Image: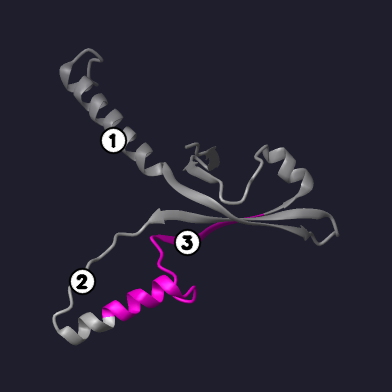
Amino acid sequence: MEEPNSILFQSRAFRKGKEQNRLNLFRLAMFRVRVNKIESIRDLDGNLGKRVELIEDRQIPHFVMRPQTEEAKVVQDVIQAMQQQLPVFPMRGEVAIPKIILFLTEQEYESLGIEFDVNQLYEIMLESQTIQFRKVTA
């Protein structure tokens, strides 16, 4: 058995603590969501409630592709003009991926203590079997 004051014991304890900290980092997940939709619902017992849809809010990188031929440049210009003019072809800088949908009775919604508003941003933290919501302010 090693002495608690020995350098070897302290080094092993330090490495073990460092590994534990690294594991704790992997246990924490954080991402940003935006409230996309809030709907009124009824549960199976007929109680009123809310359906809250949260979508992941993240930016996608813009890739600039230079056309090699004159024909490809004309096609690219036409598509860009259509995207700007017609709502059928939206130009999006964000990707909306459904992340969480909450089905809550009115009592559960009030117990949660969060007043969800459409388009409000939240940071979601997942850690040690808990979900934490933190409202993002400008």
Kindly identify the amino acid type of the residue bearing the numbered disc 1: Glu
The local secondary structure at tag 3 comes to: strand
Q: Outermost residue toward the top?
A: 5
Q: Which residue corresponds to the image point at 38% horizontal and 37% vertical from the top-left?
A: 24
User: Quarter-wise, where is residue 28 in the image?
Assistant: top left
User: Quarter-wise, where is residue 109 in the image?
Assistant: top right
* Residue 123 vertical position relative to residue 77 in the rendered view, above or below: above
- The residue that label 2 is drawn on is 65
User: Quarter-wise, where is residue 85 in the image?
Assistant: bottom left
Q: Mark 1 or mark 3, which has the lower sequence index?
A: 1
What colouring method underlies this structural image?
one colour
Q: Outermost residue toward the bottom?
A: 71
**Gap in Å between the C-alphas at discs 2 and 1?**
44 Å
The local secondary structure at tag 2 comes to: loop
Comparing 33 with 5, the one in front is 33
Q: Nearer the viewer, mark 3 or mark 2?
A: 2
Q: Mark 2 or mark 1, which has the lower sequence index?
A: 1
Magenta region: 76-102
- The residue that label 3 is drawn on is 96
Placement of the N terminus among the 4 image quadrants: top left
Give the class, few, some or many, for how many residues have Cα within 10 Å of label 2's Cα (few <14, many ≥20): few
- The x and y percentages for residue 4 are 26, 15
* Residue 127 vertical position relative to residue 66 in the rendered view, above or below: above
Give the class, few, some or many, for how many residues have Cα within 10 Å of label 3's Cα (few <14, many ≥20): some
Kindly identify the amino acid type of the residue bearing the numbered disc 2: Met
- The residue that label 1 is drawn on is 19
115 to the left or right of 7: right
Kindly identify the amino acid type of the residue bearing the numbered disc 3: Ala
**Gap in Å between the C-alphas at discs 3 and 2?**
23 Å
Q: Which residue corresponds to the image point at 47% horizontal and 55% vertical from the top-left?
A: 56
